[in-house]
Image (cartoon, rainbow, N blue to C red):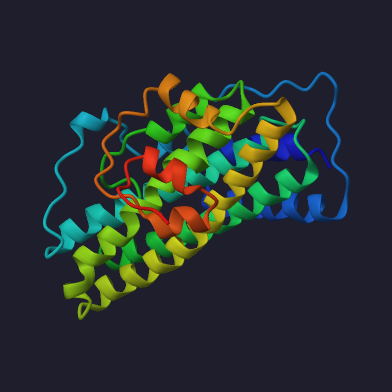
């Protein structure tokens, strides 16, 4: 089995069931076999994200303001936004395997497991969207995560720093804040369903960030770099000065961040 051909198909497809089927195939194969790659293998550059056929992509500044969560439409816009992040994360996890064949087998298995998790997260949210009377693609989206993957396609160290250790870690900061805003509406069974989904996502995303942390540190050691190169990478991608209103110290520590890093990111206290 050539997992790279299979992954290429999975990443390009907008069919979530096909993505899931191919991801499971690759994970089963990698769990039982050594994975080799043809010497002349060259991963393609994906010109557009796989969701382009489903979604209207706009500049982030053009996204409409999120409406009050008290209305069905307002709640649906929130669910859709989170579903879009989870959908994007599926392709990013698959691409982490596809684009960097030189990485160890354990790395491949880690990110295929992450892709499986992200598919499950997306499906939970998609099911909730349907209950709300909507579907994925009914609201405009931006392609920020796709662009971040594109910008880091040449360097696996940058990919691990930017995707799991920056964007996914930022999700750990935001997730509890969303749950807090929704908490007084949990008598609504659809809101309760969303809170339950967010709690599952939160717990599993800590593990995803931890995997990114593991492989970031592996690459730093392999390349003889100080782990503080993380901040140099953030600065190079113009992410260091991004406003972070809340840093989730406990979740970031659990995911592998040091207190020194957490304070540099803006937390006032960490012990």
53 sits left or right of 77 in the view: right
Q: Residue drawn 49% across and 45% down?
A: 89
The x, y position of residue 230, in whole percent, is: 51, 31
Dividing the image into 4 quarters, which one contains the N terminus?
top right
Q: From this viewpoint, which residue is outermost toward the front?
A: 271
Dividing the image into 4 quarters, which one contains the C terminus?
bottom left
The x, y position of residue 194, in whole percent, is: 32, 67
Towards the viewer: 106 or 11: 106
231 sits left or right of 215 in the view: left
The x, y position of residue 67, in whole percent, is: 12, 52
Q: Quadrant of residue 158?
A: top right
Classify 61 as above or below 244: above
Regarding residue 63, the answer to whether it shows in the image is yes
Q: Residue drawn 71% across and 33% down?
A: 221
158 sits left or right of 148 in the view: right
Q: Residue drawn 24% across and 58% down?
A: 76
Q: Residue drawn 57% across and 52% down?
A: 210
Classify 161 as above or below 180: above
The x, y position of residue 73, in whole percent, is: 17, 57
Towards the viewer: 13 or 148: 148
Q: How many marks?
A: 0
Q: Quadrant of residue 101?
A: top right
Regarding residue 119, the answer to whether it shows in the image is no
Q: Quadrant of residue 213?
A: top right
Towards the viewer: 255 or 188: 255
């Amino acid at each position: 089995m050539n997992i790279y051909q299979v992954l290429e198909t999975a990443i390009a497809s907008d069919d979530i069931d096909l993505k899931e089927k191919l991801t499971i195939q690759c994970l089963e194969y990698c769990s039982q076999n050594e994975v080799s790659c043809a010497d002349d293998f060259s991963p393609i550059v994906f010109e557009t994200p796989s969701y382009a056929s489903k979604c209207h992509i706009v500049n982030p500044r053009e996204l409409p303001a999120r409406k009050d969560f008290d209305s069905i439409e307002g709640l649906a816009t929130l669910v859709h936004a989170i579903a879009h992040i989870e959908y994007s994360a599926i392709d990013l996890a698959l691409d982490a395997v596809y684009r960097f064949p030189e990485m160890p087998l354990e790395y491949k298995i880690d990110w295929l497991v992450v892709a499986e998790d992200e598919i499950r997260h997306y499906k939970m949210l998609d099911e909730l969207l349907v209950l709300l009377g909507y579907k994925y693609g009914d609201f405009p989206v931006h392609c920020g995560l796709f662009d971040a993957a594109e910008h880091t396609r040449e360097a696996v160290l940058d990919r691990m720093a930017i995707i799991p250790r920056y964007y996914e870690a930022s999700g750990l900061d935001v997730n509890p804040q969303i749950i807090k805003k929704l908490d007084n509406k949990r008598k609504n069974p659809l809101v309760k369903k969303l809170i339950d989904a967010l709690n599952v996502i939160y717990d599993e995303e800590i593990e995803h960030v931890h995997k990114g942390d593991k492989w970031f540190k592996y690459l730093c050691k392999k390349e003889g770099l100080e782990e503080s190169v993380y901040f140099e990478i953030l600065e190079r991608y113009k992410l260091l000065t991004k406003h972070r209103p809340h840093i989730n110290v406990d979740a970031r520590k659990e995911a592998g961040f040091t207190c020194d890093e957490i304070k540099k990111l803006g937390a006032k206290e960490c012990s």
